[in-house]
Amino acid sequence: MSSSRVSGRVYEATSNRGIGRVSVSNGDAIVQTDRDGHYSLSIDPQQDRYVFTTVPAGYRPQESFYALLDGESRSEPIDFPLVVAPERSQDCFKLLHLSDTHVVLDDSGAVSQTVLAQDLSDYVGELAPDLAIVTGDLTNMGTVPELESYRAAIDSVPIPVYSVFGGHDGNIERRSSDGDTPCTLNFEATLGPPYYSFDWGGYHFVVYATEDNYFTAAGRARKERWLWADLALQPSHRKSVLMHHTSPERALLERFQQQNGALILHGHWHSSRVFTLGETTVASAASACFGGIDTRPRGCRAVSFSPQGIQTELHAGSTTTKHSSGPHEHASNQPDGSVPEGIAIGNDTFSLAWQHALNSPLHRAAPVGFNGSVLVSLQSEELPSRNGVTSLDAHSGEEQWHYPTESSIKNRVDVVSSRHNSDDCGGNDWCVALTVTGELHLIAMATGKREWKVDLQSHPLRWVYSAPAHNGEYVIGGSKAGYGAYALATGEQKWHFAPADGDEWPSYICPQVYNEELCIVPVQRRGFLALSMEDGRVVWEQDLPVEYFCASPVLCGDVVVVSSASPHTGASLTGGLQGDLVVLEARTGKVVAHYAQALPGYATGIAVANDRIYAATAAGTVHCFDVNSGGPIWQFQSGEDLLDMTPYKRGIRSLLAAPVPFNGHVLVGGCDGWLSVLDSNTGTCTDRAYFGAPITASPGLTQDGFCVGTYGGSLSAYRIER
């Protein structure tokens, strides 16, 4: 069928006044209206399924900004009446960024229409935004009923909600696709075009679909032509915001940067990560309605726009669970929300020595005590941010120095003592820090000054949640997309080993160095490997079902205790998966013992001391086993979570911090906000203290006590009172 033309008018509905210089598109070509609001656009009925307009700032559609075509030539005009909306022309406004809602119609997932509607209502009520964007995977399968359910939920809030197409929103169509049919038709029938743009205030917003496999070859070419043509039409003073589902590839990011791109918002990985390349900031969001893959709490990102620039703030959704103090409530739980003044451990009382307010949550990065200092990794993930490493005086809590990094540090730092480093380093003490985007830093402990910085391969597009390690001569940094060994003295790369294609599944599993000769690393869905510290070759490999959520291995003499997940279809989604514990010979990888399904949920943190294994689980339990026989000795149950942080779950009990053996007891930080002191022999809770926010990082030990950090951003130090 030959092409035809459609024409129409963009005009102010009340006055009938035409609006000029407004873009109108068929999803490929773009034309602009004349001074009276008229446009004429060539249409191919076999290719073009809709016509849409870019609604200018200060207006809203009277009915819709797009019109679906019926596959036939159109003779009647397609008009777009707009209503004056002064709130959309304000220089200062707020956008909510949500993502990955995964609405389902049955009990196969966490999010129903009712749940999403309530969460949206809570976020809108608490943060008072002007508009919201949901960056894809709106539904689980992309059926029309699911999409209609999602549509009903977003229509229930009093602000406009813009929806991005994600792969899950085309899953049901892709199952039967022959490659010549787009997999976005259900989305289009329910929510409209999978890509379009609009203006708000002084910014240009682009809703875009990046998952090319859901488009035909012709469709991919069309949407790419449209994107760059749309951005090229923007005046030089107007900055653009790009909103899509998957994380941006380097080519798109660099080209968008050249088009006055200020911000990219995306989802897909159910995780929070922020970085800046040139003048363009990239920010992802954790899941809006359940715990993130990176164990960030469900929630959203509030983005504030003003003539001064862009600021962002993370907001966690609260649980609906009623929290009780439980059977072991301790008098140190202060009703005014202050932290406990003292914690009893055996016959000793550890008194509060100091508190320090951090400018970021203490998430999974345990504070590190060393030689009179406490080192804290910072990850604010907001704009403006204060990322990096802060060194505090262990006695007073006063800041000794702050070392800034461009992106957040997701895990603890490593310390290289002068007793262990090579002569080339002058006998100094060093702190090694690794950012989420793959920057490896060596910092002088005495001054907080940089010795060297190395960008890992594929920086800044990495997702590195592990901690660095060292053998006194070389530093190991990376994650499953690639580990590298770097000379401690110079930062020069000695070798690089890439066991997997990518590291986007956020994992806190950290490499372990054995006897200064081997580096034991995990590889998701492959197992554990031991690499030679000399040249990076694989010395041994043990095939175990390792998933991103498993706990870090723990060395104990000549063995290493690792956790794995029992094979299970959809294992990464269960949250209640049975967990295994495996003891390996560190030098050879030989299985010494395999305790199958020893845990009611996968292990999130492990500690080993005095022939005992202590394992915290996603089911909110702590288990003690005999390291030699695997026999269970005791178990402990935590309370209800204060925030929904366990991947894919909400309203449960879970633990994220590894237990810490200390003075014949075990310190357990809970997502319920309690620090529990357990007798190491019996598991009896001898004391517990409430901190008012989830304790998701293990307490850090100091020379005369310990530090407890919370997700709320407080760090409290306790030392012995005799």
Image (cartoon, helix red, strand yellow):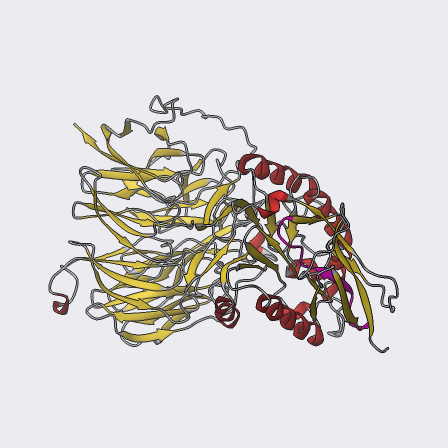
Front in this rendered view, residue 658 or 32: 32
Q: Position of residue 543 (x, y in %)?
A: 46, 66
**Count of all numbered marks drawn on residues in the image:** 0
Tell me the residue at 57%/39% (across/down).
Answer: 123
Front in this rendered view, residue 593 or 365: 365
Q: Position of residue 564 (x, y in %)?
A: 47, 56
Side (left or right) of 558 relative to 551: left
Task: Look at the image and say whether residue 47 sits in the magenta stretch.
Answer: yes
Q: State which region is magenta.
A: 44-58
Q: Position of residue 301 (x, y in %)?
A: 51, 47
Side (left or right) of 41 relative to 447: right
- Residue 217, by quadrant, is bottom right
Determine the main secondary structure of the stretch shown in magenta. Answer: loop
Is residue 45 at least partly visible in the picture?
A: no
Quadrant occupied by the N terminus: bottom right
- Answer above or below: position of 230 versus 221: above
Task: Look at the image and say whether residue 371 sits in the magenta stretch.
Answer: no
Tell me the residue at 87%/62% (across/down).
Answer: 76
- Answer above or below: position of 151 versus 449: above
Quadrant occupied by the C terminus: top left
Q: Position of residue 449 (x, y in %)?
A: 20, 58
Is residue 466 at least partly visible in the picture?
A: yes
Front in this rendered view, residue 473 or 145: 145
- Answer above or below: position of 24 versus 179: above
